Image: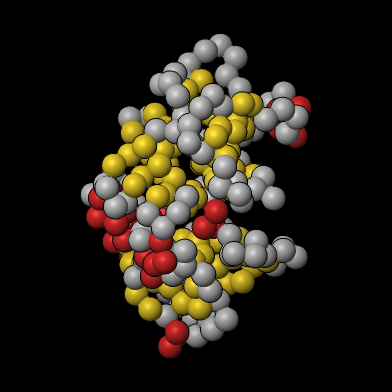
Amino acid sequence: MYYSSAIGATVNRWSFSKDYTRLSDQKIFAANNERHAGWQNVDGSFADVTENLGQQSKSDFEDPVYYRGLGFAGENFGFAYLSNGSLLKEKELYLPTGNLSPDAVQEGDVHKVGLPYNEKGALLISKYGNGKYFPRDVTSWVDATHAIVNLQEEGNYSSFIVDTAAQTEIAYIPGHFRDNWNGVLSPDGTQIAFMSEPKSGTDIQTDIHIVPAGGGNPAKVEGHPHALQGKDYLTKDGTCTLIDWI
């Protein structure tokens, strides 16, 4: 399993390109708080999509621009322009990773137009979710009509399977005492790994658990590096996130 420790960022599978060589990110300029969308390459360099499109401010007297990366789907990279830096005035855009030119930019949610969503019916996620959850909340696909989805409501975190055809939610983790998130299906389709911690207690530890895909009693994964350090680094706010199996 991969789990990312990108500090201060919310990271999921779709934050990475399909070959894991790019990580969606945002470059912040301390002088004027301008923000550029792009991605980190494996060598640590930043591919600045905003600058490649010529959208950066051109002088100290121009208003700073606000862009942020939304992630990858297939060969496309999604990003957003925030008017006046407001999420309420956000325009979602995308373009092929191999063509960072203004002519290649299209408007829309990359997670609705790019793989894996088109092939697996994710448009129904938005329709059925009705504002409750969206395609980007999908952490893994089970099959063409079933997706594992994160949901945060009133401070509680849950992971469940959505049947997009029947428009129902299927619990695969027993009980209600724990927060659970970022479920990821194993390559052979028999197990789901997810992150979990008690909702209350005096010594809360976040761990990775594995459960049969059809449901059952979860088993804790022993010996992953963060647990061995005895520190709660695996947190649901995105500072460390379960990404995939290897």
Residue 238 showing in the rendered view: no
The spot of residue 217 in percent (x, y) is 54, 24
- Residue at left 38%, top 29%? 155
Q: How is the image coloured?
A: secondary structure
Residue 108, quarter of picture: bottom left
Residue 210, quarter of picture: top right
Decide: is 38 above or below 195.
below
Residue 215 showing in the rendered view: yes
The spot of residue 126 in percent (x, y) is 29, 55
Decide: is 129 above or below 157.
below
Residue 158, quarter of picture: top left
Kindly give the residue lying farthest to the bottom in the view shown.
103
The spot of residue 166 in percent (x, y) is 27, 47
Q: Is residue 43 left or right of residue 153?
A: right
Residue closer to the observer: 207 or 184:
184
- Residue at left 61%, top 71%? 47
Residue closer to the observer: 67 or 78:
78
The spot of residue 222 in percent (x, y) is 72, 27
